[in-house]
Every structure is written in structure tokens, then in C-alpha cells.
Image (spheres, rainbow, N blue to C red):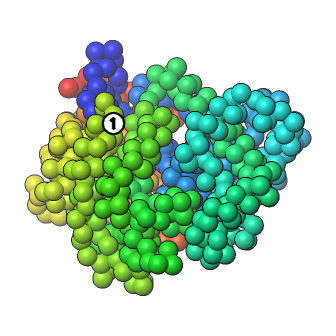
Amino acid sequence: MRRSPSQDTEVSGMYTRASGMLLHITSLPSRYGIGDMGPAACGFASLLRDTGQLYWQVLPLGPTSTAIGNSPYSSCSAFAGNPLLISPEKLVEDGLLSWADIEYPPGTDPSRVNFHVVEQHRQRVLRAAFERSRHWLEKDYTFTAFSRKHHHWLHNYVRFVTIKKWHDGAVWSEWPEPLRFRHEEALARWDAEHHEEMLFETFVQYVFFRQWNDLKEYCSGAGVRLIGDVPIYVTYDSADVWEHPEFFKLDDQRKPLMVAGVPPDYFSKTGQRWGNPVYNWDALARDGFAWWVRRLAHNFDQTDLVRIDHFRGFAGYWEIPAEEETAINGEWVDAPGMQLFSALSRHFTVLPLIAEDLGIITPDVRELKSAFNLPGMKVLQFGFGGDKLINNPDAPMNHERHNVLYTGTHDNSPMRHWFVHEAGDQGRSNFAAFAGHDVVEAGAAETAIRIAMSSVANTAIFPVQDVLGLDGTARMNTPSVPAGNWEWRLRPEEMELPFYRNFAQMTEFFGRWT
């Protein structure tokens, strides 16, 4: 699936017959506790180029919090960038700080993210950068142009985070009533009395998007296309719900009536109760789905393609009464996906989207995806279960060209761990049958990559953990497990090209098959 000039014909934003890797920014190595948008990010883009890969897929880029498990899928904003991803080194290169200003506490584990320490460090670094910039900031054209461009979300976002900090992190529904219900006089008074803190938060977003744009430009120059990720839902304790309560199913005190999740499935016997408020689709439709248009326009500006997480929720979604502790007692509710995507198609010439259509997929989901020519997903790890693989949609013989194929996702174990601990005897037997030879633990990931690269699917994305053949300690996320997720990182030596030469040869060989 190595790219070539003859393969530069796009189909719904996807190049034909190309491959890439999945690695979130936080998982990059750095000297500052967490992967960021600095030198290692550019180094990874170069590594992709040097191994003949076209795509770099990342997870959502919004702010995260230790209070809600550090998940990039649970953010206080659908638009803002995560301050933890800001590179301290680039702040020094830009002349805002000295090397002494960005020193990081010694003795931290380079293979894991300690989010608590990182949050403290970034706040200190960004405060210092703000103080050094304060005398020119509001007079700087690029800063004021950024503020104008993003005003539709930025002003209320910085209000939200400053009010939240002032109230010791309290959920917005617990704020004093004038702020909770967004009374105009209370908000105007807040803006006047907290101008400096709001300016700091605006500065943080300005720095984030400046660094992200630099990274995107570097990727473009290296011939690498970025794939972003948009969660279908937003977090209740977010600027989005606070600003637009009419777009969500809330009671008269603006607390959720219904929350989102999925029914019992492969990942959990009790389903997943995500807790996000579900949309008031009637209100969104009356507004011409303008909020969704703005949201996707923002994401299309950040990346070349966008994966929409839980795409089936646009056809029908699992709605759970807010008082329920698990997802078992929910029910399916129809969603106006056709109306929404028709509105999006009128606004955008191309919809460069990947539909995450895993789980229980019904005809209406397939119809929605087909109507707008959106590629769906297949996960190879799911493709070997059961004794009748012809009925398994992820089995290799059931792949289609217009698919994006993954060996696993951020929610899966690395292939090596799956093969030993999760596949079971039947799965291992089916896996070996497709491989055409016996498979041992050390070769499980490479075998999976070879099977994937021989698939008819146009696009294959491989988690870096599988490219390197890592074990279960490198897992990124375990659904329904609240602690210990999102912490895994590459070691600096695992960014070196020799580790990837065999992978590059495999992708080059299979790329000749069309």
C-alpha cells in the first residue's frame, strides 16, 4: 500500500491504496512529560515519509482533565486545543522563554504520562510565556486575527474555563444562577472583572493553534496527510453545552435527562454508559445544523480527513435515562442523519470523513454511509472470532475496497497481547488459517500486518504498537476501566528508522497489489 503518483485520485477524501500509522500526539517521546507538537512530532512525520506511509492518524485534540480520566474523548470543548500538547521547546525557539524556564521535574517514567505533573508544568510554563508576551499581545496582528477568526467559539470557551477555575472546578450546573443561565449582565460583568485571566486563556489557544498549524504545514511538506478524530458527543461539563443548552436534552435546571452510550457488546457485558448528554436533534435541525457545520469546518481546517467516532449514532443512538448507573436499560432512538449530512453536503464540496461504523450496524446505518459515499471501518482483530467467518463483517473475505482497515484501534489491545490472551483457541486457529502458517506470539503483529496489507481495502492504518510488535503494556485505552488509560508513550529509541524497515518493506510489497 505504498503510495505512488498514480494513486493520487481521491475517493471521498481518501487516496486509493495507501497506508499509515495511528499514534496520538501524547504518545510521542519528549523531555517534558508528554508527547507534544515539538521536534518529535516533526520527527514522526519524517518517519512516516521515510517508510512510505501516507497517513498519520491522531486522537481528538481537545483539552483533557485528570478529573475525568484524561480521555481525549471527554473534553470541555469541541473546538479548543489541549494546552498539554503545546511544545515548551518551541516556546523557547520563538523567544518567549529560556531553557531554564521550561525545566521538567527529574525522575519521571519516560514510557508513561503522569498527567498531574504535566498539568502543573504546562500551567507554569504557559503563565511565564504569557507574562513575557503581555506588553505586545493585544497589539499583535496575528493574535487579534486569530481571536476574530475563532470568535464563534473562543470567547465563550475562555469565559467557561475562567469561571470554572474561579469556582474550584465545579460543574457549570453548580455555578451561581446568573452565570449558570448565562444572564447577559452577569457575563458582561465577568468579562470586565476577569479580562486578564480570559486574555491568558485566549493566549494559550493562540499558541496551540499556531503550533498545530506549523506541524500540519510540516506534515504537508513531508507528503503526510493527517487524520483527525471527532467524538460524536460532547461532554456535559463543557463550554458547548453551557453555551447551547437548547441543543441537548436537559431539564429546566439544565441537567441531563438522557445520556449516551452503547448497549452490551464485545467490550462490556453491561454496555458503556458514557454520560454525555444526547442531542436535541429537533433544535439542531431548526438551526439548519449550523453548530455541526461550524464544528466540522473547524476540524477540516485542522486535519486533512476526519474520523467520526460512533457514526451509527447519526442513524440511531442508545439513549439511557440519566439516573441509570449502567447502559443496560437504554433504548434505540432514531436520529436525522440523512438531514444532517444533506446539510453538510450543501456546505462542503467534499466530506473528507471516515465513518466509525463498528458494533451493531443496521441497514439504516449502511444506507446513510452509502448515500454520502463515506468509507467505513474494519478491525482485523475482530475478524477471526466464531466458527462461521462468512458471517463476520471484519473477516478478511468480507472487506471491501471502500474500507479503512485497522489491525486494532486505540480501544484494542496490541495484536501480540490479543493473540495470546484474547483470541482464544478458535480465533488463533482462524488467524493461522488466514496466514497460511503457524503463528507464534512474537510474530502475531507482523502476521496481522501482512494479512491487512493483502486486503482489498484501499486504506490500512496500523497502531504503532502493532508496527513495533509491542505487548499489552503498550495498550492505550481499556473501555469501561476508569484508571490507567491514555498514558502509554513511545521511548525515544523506538522512533528510529531501523525499527520500521521491515514494516516499510511489507507495505511496499503489498502496495504493488491492486
Quick one: 431 or 482, which is closer to the camera? 482
**Residue picked out by circle 1:** 347
Taking the image as shown, residue 424 lies to the left or right of residue 158, namely: left
Q: Position of residue 508 (x, y in %)?
A: 34, 25
Dot 1, crowdedness within 10 Å: few (<14), some or many (≥20)? Answer: few
**Quadrant of the image for the C terminus?**
top left
Displayed quadrant of residue 51: top left
**Quadrant of the image for the N terminus?**
top left
User: What's the residue at 25%, 29% (across, down)?
Assistant: 11
Q: Position of residue 342 (x, y in %)?
A: 24, 43
Above or below, 221 against 338 in this view is above
User: What's the residue at 55%, 25% (across, down)?
Assistant: 217
Displayed quadrant of residue 363: bottom left
User: What's the residue at 55%, 55% (across, down)?
Assistant: 77
Taking the image as shown, residue 455 lies to the left or right of residue 45, namely: left
User: What's the residue at 63%, 61% (across, down)?
Assistant: 184
Secondary structure under the numbered disc 1 in the rendered image: helix
Quick one: 127 or 442, which is closer to the camera? 127
Q: Position of residue 204 (x, y in %)?
A: 70, 45
What is the three-letter code of the residue carrying label 1? His
User: Can residue 472 be seen from the camera position used here?
Assistant: no
User: Can residue 245 be seen from the camera position used here?
Assistant: yes
Q: Position of residue 372 (x, y in %)?
A: 21, 41
